[in-house]
Image (cartoon, helix red, strand yellow):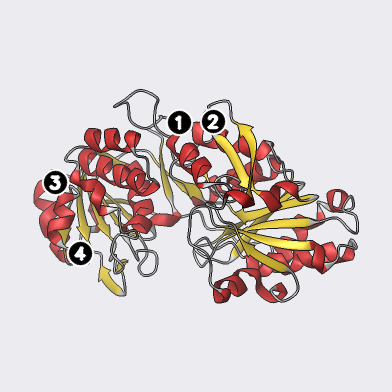
Amino acid sequence: MLDLKCGDQTYPLQISADRVLSVLRPRPFIPQGTPSQLIEKAINGCEQTLSAFRPGEKVVIVTSDVTRPTGSEVYLPLLVSLLSQAGIRDRDIEIVIALGIHRKQTEAEQRKIVGSVYDRVKVSDHDCDDPGALVYLGDTSRGVPVEINRRVAEADRLILTGAITFHYFAGFGGGRKSMLPGVSSRRSCMASHFALLNPEEGSGRHPKAVTGNLDGNPVHEAMLEACGKRPPELILNTVLGPDKKIVAAFAGNWRDAHLAGCRFYADAFSAQVDELADLVLVSCGGFPKDINLIQAHKSMEYASRALKPGGIMVLLAECRDGYGNATFFNWFGYPTCGELESALRKRYEINGQTAWSVKEKAERFRVVLVSRLPGEEVRTMGMTPAGTLEEALGIALPMLPENYRAYVILEGGNVLPVYRPA
């Protein structure tokens, strides 16, 4: 018996097994070592690069904030230890937390991110709104201004760190994304994200700005150009399993190591489907993965890849903290996706972009949302509210063809269906 989670609740699967095409999961694999061993092995291949670091040089290490688990509490102490062995003094090392446009971190959050070296080296939060702490490096070929953290730009040696994941319009996280949007100005962040829209009014999202794709992706290309204006000497990127433990690590040249990590991630966390289903039952995986709708959108985005146009998605996402941003729901005041897109082009916000993505799927499919969100607000977003899986299926099943077929996804944020017709 399969169970689907919603917040702290667990619901048994309630459809006949002969209707289920497949249960979509990441590819099973066994990590080739402990988290520390994986990091050490990756860094050992970078001895030539690290040997060029000299005593007295200022070294900046960029790492992600607390909303993006990376295993930093494992790898940052190892990196600082290696720098010490190269003669770099603790006082010449600074860890900059790549907040993008997120809020500052508390001391407890900084300690969690940095681990055992918190009291040894300087730790600072990036501030996207402080002009004095930013430096302008020029524009990308598509006109994105590159304004980055001054300490990052002026470091003698720069190391970028983070985790590789799928990203719903940049293709993948990690690598160059630590620079833009990680340590960039608000203006730069907004301009790079806006690149996901086609230039023409009403033309929607660029067809290459999608999950798991880098080739021809305008958002990825903007990030690459930005990073190339102050290329790091080294990157270290991790891959985390569903339990948020490091299962692989990639280090080296900022382009090559990232691409290698993306190839690994795509292979491990994709599930090939040779036909699209009438119904997809998808859980985010329960709390905290479904803490709000912005977080749950990732599962919605991935699951849509396995669904026929006009098909039905039952999404289990408790959303105990609501939408995840105070202005998110306001975007659904626009009755159609086209009108929302037009407003977004005039006054771009990242939350508006996510709202547009939710609305776009609500228009292409019929989405039944099992959540705590007020029913009337769910309907305003173009979805049908339900309180339980049983209620959701009571709504969905009468709308399905008699011989319907379904996919089940137990951890929607951890697997990307890839449609390859038989």
| Gap in angstroms between the C-alphas marked 3 and 2 | 36 Å
Give the tally of numbered discs.
4
Of labels 1 and 3, earlier in sequence is 1
In this view, 358 is above or below 214: below
User: In the image, 251: left or right of 279?
Assistant: right
Q: Residues within 10 Å of mark 4 (few under 14, many from 20)?
A: many
Expressed as whole percent of the image width and height from the top left, the position of residue 164 reads 57, 51
Name the amino acid type tagged 3.
Leu
Residue 91's quadrant in the figure?
bottom right
Residue 123's quadrant in the figure?
bottom right
Of labels 3 and 4, earlier in sequence is 4
Residue 400 disc label: 3
* Residue displayed at 57% across by 44% down: 180
Residue 215 disc label: 2
Q: Residues within 10 Å of mark 2 (few under 14, many from 20)?
A: few
- Say which element carries label 4: helix
- The residue carrying mark 4 is 389
Residue 293's quadrant in the figure?
bottom left
- Say which element carries label 2: loop
Of labels 3 and 2, earlier in sequence is 2
Expressed as whole percent of the image width and height from the top left, the position of residue 171 reads 50, 41
Residue 420, visible in the rendered structure: yes
Q: Quadrant of the N terminus?
A: bottom left
